[in-house]
């Protein structure tokens, strides 16, 4: 199992929000090349079963409310994806534990728009910066694919 990190990870997402509010929408993108390797990352190897890809950084103080996974180019047949987060500093938090599948648990890698599947996940506010992660299962990758993860939330600030 490898951990793959996208290059320029802190600068890879678009942010939008109301000028007089705290609502935010962040878009994180992941593309695999024709060999199944993560484009613009620290790895040239094809993504394998069990690999974790760090798609970007979710700023500390962000209240996570909802998520939408958009797969515009399907992953290998039988691929499933867990979408979650892990803390940048590698230290878990007792009140807000990191979770590899906070947003989606074993979502299909087929084309389409996939809403947050873990409906029992309550809105949480991250106490510190966290990586948005995707963990691959079901099949090794061997061709191009594309995933965009849209996070909806509020900027609460670190308490």
Image (spheres, rainbow, N blue to C red):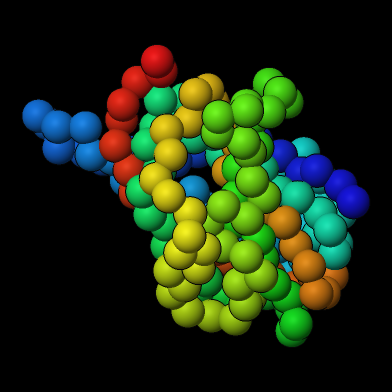
Which of 95/78 is in front? 95
Answer left or right for 39 relative to 17: right
Relative height, residue 18 to residue 150 (above, below): above
On the image, which quarter does residue 87 sit in? Answer: top right
Which of 2/13 is in front? 2
Which of 36/23 is in front? 23
Image location (x, y in percent) of residue 84: 60, 50
Relative height, residue 106 to residue 11 (above, below): below
Relative height, residue 1 to residue 157 (above, below): below
Image location (x, y in percent) of residue 129: 54, 26
Residue drawn at (36%, 48%), measured in percent from left and top? 65
Image location (x, y in percent) of residue 36: 77, 65
On the image, which quarter does residue 86 sit in? Answer: top right
On the image, which quarter does residue 4 sit in? Answer: top right
Residue drawn at (43%, 39%), measured in percent from left and top? 124
Residue 11 visible in the current orientation: no
Answer left or right for 122 relative to 146: left
């Amino acid at each position: 199992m490898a951990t793959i990190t996208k290059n320029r990870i802190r600068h890879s997402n678009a942010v939008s929000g109301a000028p007089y509010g705290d609502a935010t929408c962040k878009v994180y993108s992941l593309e695999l090349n024709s060999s199944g390797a993560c484009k613009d990352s620290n790895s040239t190897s094809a993504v394998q079963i069990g690999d974790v890809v760090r798609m970007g950084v979710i700023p500390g103080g962000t209240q996570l409310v909802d998520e939408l996974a958009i797969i515009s180019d399907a992953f290998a047949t039988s691929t499933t994806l867990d979408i979650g987060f892990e803390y940048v500093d590698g230290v878990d938090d007792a009140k807000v534990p990191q979770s590899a599948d906070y947003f989606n648990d074993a979502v299909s890698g087929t084309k389409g728009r996939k809403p947050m599947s873990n409906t029992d996940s309550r809105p949480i506010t991250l106490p510190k910066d966290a990586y948005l992660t995707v963990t691959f299962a079901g099949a090794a990758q061997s061709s191009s694919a594309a995933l965009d993860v849209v996070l909806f939330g509020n900027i609460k600030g670190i308490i």
